[in-house]
Amino acid sequence: MLRLALLLLFWAGAGVAAAQTAFPTRLTISTTFVSNGDPGVDVDLKTWNSLLTTQFSNLVNDSRYNLANAHLLNIERAKFEPALPDQPTLQRRWEQSFAIQIIAGSGLRSGETTVFDGWVYMGDLAPDPRNPQVHLRQPIRAASYTTSRDAVALSALYALSVDAGQTRSVACPLLAEANLIRRDLAASHTDVADLAHAVDKRLLALNCRPAR
Amino acid sequence: MRRAALALALALGLTAPAMAAPPIGILVPYFTGDGGIGRNVSTTLYFQVWRTLRRTPWPNPKGLDFGSGIAYYQTDPLEPATSDAALARGAEAGANLVLWGDARTLGDGVVVQAYLATPPPPASDAGPEAWVLRRGSHSVALGLPRRIFDFKPFVLSQDLVRRYQTPEAMTMCRTKVMPCAGMPLGDDWTALEHDNVWARVRGAQGAIGWLNLPEIDREPNPVAEFSAALLSYDRGDFQQARDYFTRAAKREEAGAAVRQDALTLAAIAGLRQGLPTLPELQRLAEDDPYSLYLFQATAMARLSAALGKPSEQARAERETLRSLVAKNRDLFPADSSWPGDFDAVARD
């Protein structure tokens, strides 16, 4: 509640100085897991979330994105809930918490491997608002961590670029970085294929290519 | 307890010449991690970077001197492991670069996530980090492509995990002979000098021994190579910077962003040594047409070639560049001084 009050206070302050919007305007990233009751799975999910949280915090704090409000970002530690929230609940949480994205999913055990099966919920910042979530099914293993990290970072960078609207000096570097991350994701990584196309479209729509 | 050990990578000794520029340093706090893994991963990376420091090139026909270079380690991991905490720690230690990260067990293996941060230099003296072009009283400077470098995670081999589980993973030999009955390195040590594949180290109890570097260096990686390159670049050692950036860029596992930064900085380091590397930058810009930094670097390289030349062709080139920068103005933040500075230098 206190955090929400602070955010509202921030928005009130931002409204006064609306002439120059500081980005991002949405300031939280949260994660919800549903446990399968296996303590080993919970440990894997927590470690995965911890690594993602640190990585994302360091990613967005780089000055190249011109995100004046990056220091206000609140990247929450994962919460465990008894059941996955449905889409209306996610949308409500997304709106009320001024979220950039919400990661929500279940931890499963597949053989010896933990698997995350869920979504990155992007609300109105998704490429297609009729489909506000990107499905993500990722094994939680050391060897595949880079892929899941890149998929989550790609969605966050895209969402931040949409949050920045038509401000090219903010949106374009975010999309340019997303474009680089996309190169590292295997072409067969279908979870984020639509998002990758959306990055392309937005780079063109905003005319992010410097004249040479 | 926080300890900062200092190692000057020069057999010349620890003391910087009087009145010399302050040493350029890198700080490597222990990585957070399970058991001894974080500590041993960061120590390995530390030595991999430390051994690359040099005061002068060899041969040295131009009489270059890059001054003192320092590598620090700290036994306190960063908590939280954020860039803000890293930069604060770096400022406290007087380091220009901070290399930090995590080494965690995730499922069936250990994943290492490393970051490198460099604080913005003071506007009054950006040092070698800034590539500066001047005309009369005007100047335009290009710094680094980013201030926080986020390396692709890598997975430790099972062999290294086994060895890194214990603090005894790092041992010193009494003489430069392998194999040896090692003495534990411990947590409080100072690296004194490097001699080919060996590093002479003083341990906590004053014991002096030798670490075999190939032993800990058997898996070269883009984190150490890129960090060594950036440290060299910050020290004005552009020849070595170009070499290490090029090595880091050749590693597929470095990821597209780090490889692009490495290749870009390798080309700029080449230009700053007087090599004709503009075509390298142009190829990179074709490969990633959305990079504003590559646009800036290419424009700077072209301007550098056109400055100070009275020919009509050079004047036309400067006008073309001014026009391009003006067209791209709103890709820069409103408070960026770069477009205006560039225009002032390029203008007749």
Image: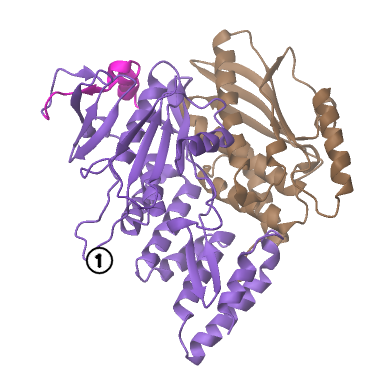
Q: Which residue is mark 1?
A: B62
Q: Nearer the viewer, residue B235 or A152?
A: B235
Q: From the image, which quarter does the C terminus of chain B lie in? A: bottom right
- At a point 85% along the width and 39% down the height, the residue shown is A11
The answer to whether residue A132 is left or right of residue B296 is: right
Residue A15 spot, x, y in % from top left = 88, 45
- At a point 24% along the width and 63% down the height, the residue shown is B63
Q: From the image, which quarter does the N terminus of chain B lie in? A: top left
Res B14 → quadrant: top left
Q: Is residue B36 magenta?
A: no
Say which chain is purple.
Answer: B
Residue B156 visible in the current orientation: no
Residue B274 spot, x, y in % from top left = 35, 70
Magenta span covers which residues?
Answer: B156-176
In the image, residue A189 above or below residue B212: below
Residue B165 spot, x, y in % from top left = 35, 17
Q: Nearer the viewer, residue B46 or A153?
A: B46
Residue B16 spot, x, y in % from top left = 31, 46
Q: Is residue B175 magenta?
A: yes
Q: As shown in the figure, which amino acid type bears the numbered disc 1?
A: Lys
